[in-house]
Image (cartoon, helix red, strand yellow):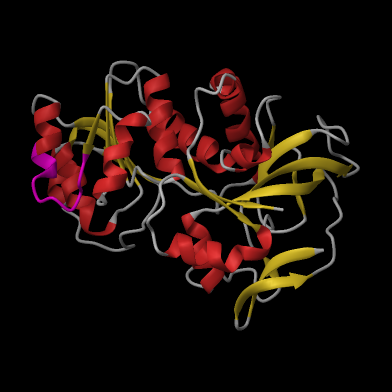
Amino acid sequence: MKAYVYGANGAAISDVPKPSPTGTQILVKVHACGMNRADLGMIKGHVHGSAGGAGTVLGMEWAGEVVELGPDAKGWSVGDRVMGSGGGGYAEYAVTDHGRAFPIPAPMDYEQAASLTLALTTMHNAVVTVGGLQPGQSLLVQGASSGVGLMAQQIAKLKGAKLVIGSSTDPKRRAQLTSHGADRAIDSNDAGWVDQVLKATDGAGVDVIIDQVSGKLVNQNLAATKVLGRIVNVGRLGGTHGDFDYDLHAARRISYIGVTFRTRSIQEIRDIFTAVKQDIWPAVEAGKLALPIDRVFPFDDIAQAVDYMSANQHFGKIVLKL
């Protein structure tokens, strides 16, 4: 089968064997793949990206139809339309655990479905389960113009947030945040952004920050969070290291929590998928939780799609179509 594979000289489309489902896995014929910023590091072999070594099929989310079941897979039938996550998504066929997929609602096309799985699971877990957002509270999303960032805003409003603030350093993308769940938009490169957040919250700070940037923003985030607030560290696009004001952290008694899928067990991941289905799935089926698709590329043009994502000018999701 055709797949986008990490190799010693970078990533390229190659011909590799079609996977076979084992245990609780399902085999999916992929129709569309969602691209994510984390893919860029994997494509270049940076950080955890090359962990699988040469020959690893890249890609983390996709949508398609079930064509085969592992002997212990339950809950699915051949022919079911599904969207799922896991490794090896940039390919004509992908396998995933039976608990790591959602049914595609009848009116939804494969391109939209391919954009949703990681955003829904990552941000329901970050905003609701870990962040503990309650109705009437306030939330700030750092790096809000990405697919996961936009989904965090929408989930927060769905769960009754009184105030949602999104950040983007790009003026064009920042101007679009209020059309996708934000009540206010800020520029985190603006030296006065913390004061803007404090003013919007009557001096208290926000209840929850979903941080996808980190690095240089960490102490400003502490200053923008209310006493007994929560900061959930989801991404580190602005740097993995930075000065940390322990005194401010302690004085404001902030819960600072890091999350990632990489160290979660398959049961923990299944539980996240179950929580999404039990809590917000009706809103997905009704189209209330959806993402703008910036551009769809043919799978054979994946190199151009990678360059487009690397330019960091898109808003929402980039999708590959097979």
Majority secondary structure of magenta residues: loop
In this image, 87 relative to 262: left or right?
right
Q: Which residue occupies 82% across, 40% down?
A: 66
Looking at the rendering, the stretch of residues picked out in magenta corresponds to 186-195
Q: Position of residue 214 (x, y in %)?
A: 29, 54
The x and y percentages for residue 157 are 37, 22
Instruction: Out of 204 and 62, give the one closest to the viewer.
Output: 62
Q: Is residue 152 left or right of residue 193?
A: right
Where on the picture, by quarter, is residue 110?
top right
**Residue at 88% across, 36% down:** 78
Q: Where does the image place residue 119, in percent across and percent down from the top left?
A: 51, 40
Residue 97 vertical position relative to residue 6 in the rendered view, above or below: above
Q: Residue at x 63, y 37 (%)?
A: 113
Furthest-bottom residue in view? 9
Lateral position of residue 152 relative to residue 173, left or right: right
Magenta-drawn stretch contains 35: no
**Count of labels shown?**
0
**Residue at figure coordinates x 27%, y 59% from the top left:** 215
- Out of 169 and 158, give the one closest to the viewer: 169
Residue 225 is drawn in which quadrant?
Answer: top left
Specify whether 213 is left or right of 113: left
The correct choice, above or below, for 40 with respect to 95 in the image is below
In the rendered image, which quarter contains the N terminus?
bottom right
**Can residue 131 be seen from the camera position used here?**
no
